Amino acid sequence: MSTPHRSQHRSPRRLSLSGSALAALLTAVAVCAGDTAARVFPYGPRHRSINDLGNQFVPFHAHLWDLLHGRAEGGLLFNWQSGYGTSFLPDLGTYLTSPLSVLVGLFPRAEIDLAVYVVTVLKMTVAAAAMAWLLRTQRRGPWWAAGLLGASYALCGWSVIEASYNPMWLDGLIAFPLLCLTGEWALRGRRPVLAPLVVAVCWTANFYTAYMATLGAALVLVVRVALTREGLRTRTAVIARAAGTTLLGILFAAPVLVPLFLSSGQAYPGWVKEFRPVSWADLFARLLPATYSFSSPAVFVGTGTLLLVAALPFHRAVPVRARLWWAGLTVAVALSLQWAPTHLAWHLFATPNGSPYRQTFVLAGIAVIAAWTGLAAGLPRPPALAAGAGLLTAAVLWSRGSTLGTHWGYALFAGGLALAGAGWWALRHRRLALPAAGLLAAVLLAQAAATTAYGHKGKLGGLDDYPSWGAAHTARAEALAAAEGWPAYRTDPSRPALSGNDPMLLGGEGGSYYSSHTPEVFTRTMVALGAGWTSRGRNVQSIDNPVTDAVFAVGARLRPDGTVRRAEVPPLVTTRPPGAPLAYGDSPFANQELLLGARVYEDPLAPGVCRAGTEAYLWAPEYNATARLADGPAFRLNGNAPRNRAALQPMGVSRGASSALVFDAAPPARWTLSCLDRDRLAGAVAVLRATAATSLHIGSATIQAELPPGAKGTAVLSVPAIAGWTCNGRPATAHLGLVALPLDGRTTTLSCSFRPPGLVPGAAAAGLALVVLTVLVLRRRQRI
């Protein structure tokens, strides 16, 4: 094949490096160009942080920044800032264990949005470089073509539309070519030490997409073994080496994986729905550039790459067996996206919330490898290109029955198909090689940039978006920092929130928390006390209520106007008198009193009217409109069940009959108005303070307290009773959803520590893997 450069004088390794560098460069240019065209952050005024990116992932990276700079409350095992105290290792393993994530620490904290964006683009470029390197490892071919195909993989529709706002998914985009590379090493009996470490990094970075990438890499290895090795014994030896490498790598990642899996089982149940495949018209429409949908597989990889894949069955320079295996694998994986049993297998046997086609990047990678298989054997002849173009045209004509196609998408596809076909044909002529390669690169850049920009249009038009760090963030963060008093009391960012994880984003030690690992015990406890939620219970909001503030030691709470409301509250460790076990009921007001240990609420004097001087609080969890006291401001309740649950809402101080409750829409079927007596609350707080811990020391995952002499009943920590707490050498008990320890009158010291369940077995598994790997290395050296 003619190439645009005289590469015969350069070493294979240097050529592979050049291909990887080209892939990375093209990927970065296309993504940044698309973002610029869409005028999204950091190139324009439009927010980039849509949905979970701004609500969840940016705050988690902000917390990582704090950890790296020694400013976080907590450590790698426990997070004191969110959910009034929660396990952090599972969140770390789910969202932040990519080696590239730590780069956010190089940016100013106020530039956390930019830091996450840079890391996101960098992950795409690394995926492109890894794929280009893999292609030239599998089979020699033009370095620049490997670069083009590597970039087309990293710029697939799944990457620039779906994974670009789920940065941890991009670790799977990197993992697929890396895991295929470990398969190549197993095929050739090379890198026995490095291979398990690569697997461990991939699985630690993001186990969810690494699992999908591992399945895809296994399929690729099966084809490689079938085509390059003969004999059952030889083939079995290769598969066994690859399986052993993968198992060792997963064991090395076990200290993160085991706690993560156990935490997932203890999380509040997410949304469960049945998988329904999309129509074939929709699937074929996603071959086009400039399409958008989160409910169909974004299989676009650039028309130039698709043309090579479609031409492969007709490419006579490729042996028939290779054509059948690679074309068959590509088709089989595409079909597996549409069949429920294989859909479940790709997704760890659970249909995911949101996008049901998260494995699409594996199909994109296999398509790119298939394209490289044909190209490395020689340029397809015009008849093969024509046949491939015919197949693509038929698929696109079929897609006309879909609503996902756009005029721009069809135009870009048609133009790209013509230009790509011309480019691959022109490469047969040495004098046209350089402009032909440039033409192919231009087609890829234009289509990928357009797909990126169109994806932003769809996301911003249909999903929530959150502002990048600005003046409002700075003002709130400064107010929280000025009010900070940890561990004597908590400081809560409160509501309305800028994100679901404001304590991590802005500071403080608040009650709000949003994660895939939000503990069920935390959600149920907070809901029993009147908390609201979004995301069907996994995004729990802080409760703006002085009773729960007393229970959770919230001594400073940020108000909507930016000022801070302070209160005298008990410390984090208090005691309760002996008594029968307690359980929550239906009323959040009664539940608050139960946890506080005193009656502080009154019933209304008349329906909807509190006694003058008391504070009115409305609980209407399904109400989705505004409500107010007749002489006060209106307050919005967001009760769009089952996704959202309205929080218990403070309505203001009652003036009597003139402060009757008014619903600005049809009253909900279930609501309660209760009236808080501040004097009673002050008395209850005084009692708790008088019998609370006399001294307190908080570590990264520990609490030590001195208790009053002769204390009996129960010591209660204002921390959710998640699994993993031990107190005074034995597993902690629970008191109405909070960590507790029974007292016998002789206990004067409380010493509690938290260890994520599964950490010790995970560490043991990693130790076993290290022993096995060491033995294998020693045996290998003895043979040498």
Image (cartoon, grey):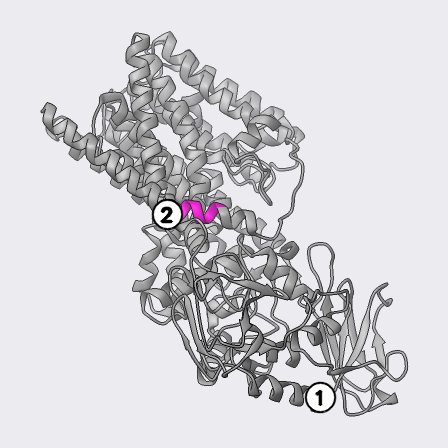
Q: In the rendered structure, which disc, 2 or 1, sits on the residue that comes first in sequence?
A: 2
SS state under label 1? helix
Q: Position of residue 10 (x, y in %)?
A: 12, 31
Which residue is rendered at x = 38% and y = 34% of the image?
A: 176
Give whichever of 474, 781 is nearer the camera.
781
Which residue is rendered at x = 32% and y = 64% of the image?
A: 68
Task: Judge whether 593 appears above or below 237 on screen.
Answer: below
- Which region of the structure is painted magenta? 255-261
Q: Which residue in the rendered view is the most extreme toward the right?
A: 606
Mark linked to residue 680: 1
**Residue 378 occupies which quadrant of the picture?**
top left
What's under tag 1, amino acid-wise?
A: Arg
Which residue is rendered at x = 64% and y = 66% of the image?
A: 736
What's under tag 2, amino acid-wise?
A: Pro
**Residue 666 occupies which quadrant of the picture?**
bottom right
Which residue is rendered at x = 73% and y = 75% of the image?
A: 635
Q: Which residue is mark 2?
A: 255
Q: Is residue 357 left or right of residue 204?
A: right
How packed is label 2: few (under 14 Cα within 10 Å), some, or many (20 or more)?
Answer: many
Specify whether residue 259 is painted magenta: yes
Q: Position of residue 262 (x, y in %)?
A: 50, 47
**Residue 282 occupies which quadrant of the picture?**
top right
Q: Main secondary structure of the magenta part?
A: helix
